[in-house]
Amino acid sequence: MFYCIVRRSFRTIKRYDEDFKMSIVSLHENGRSINSLAREYGVSVSTVAKCTKLYASVSTETGEVFTAKQIKVLQKRNAILEKKI
């Protein structure tokens, strides 16, 4: 598990790398509960929930697989392109 510690005021914020987040999501998709993953890896339940929300895969009708994060980026690009037209 790799993370960066950022100190702001009185709080310490941990930032986890994308590989760690993807492995958590993979374990969750294979049947592990959010609570058990949080306990095992020493992260908060909200962190695991956010990771599963952002990195869970979605399949399209054409067979393409996207994460919620990728879909959000595509929506932003579409909005920019629509403004140019």
Image (cartoon, rainbow, N blue to C red):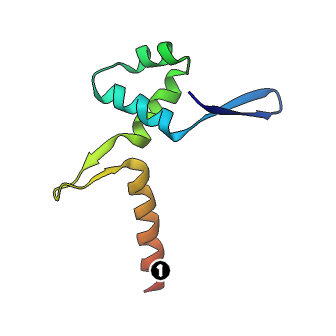
For the point 48% across and 13% down, the residue is 40
Task: Point out the image quarter for the C terminus.
Answer: bottom left
Q: Report the residue at 78% width, 33% height from top.
A: 7
Residue 18, x across and y down, in percent = 51, 40
Residue placed furthest toward the bottom:
85
Q: How many marks?
A: 1
The residue drawn where x is 35% and y is 40% is 56
Residue 26: quadrant of the picture: top left
* Residue at numbered disc 1: 83
Q: Residue 21: x and y, percent?
A: 48, 34
Q: Residue furthest right?
A: 9
In the visual, does 74 lie left or right of 17? left
Q: Position of residue 11 (x, y in %)?
A: 76, 27
23 lies above or below 32 = below
Q: Quadrant of residue 57?
A: top left
Residue 44 sits above or below residue 23 on the image = above
Examine the image and state in which quarter residue 82 appears. Answer: bottom left
Q: Secondary structure at mark 1?
A: helix
Q: Is residue 27 above or below residue 51?
A: above
**Mark 1 belongs to which amino acid?**
Lys
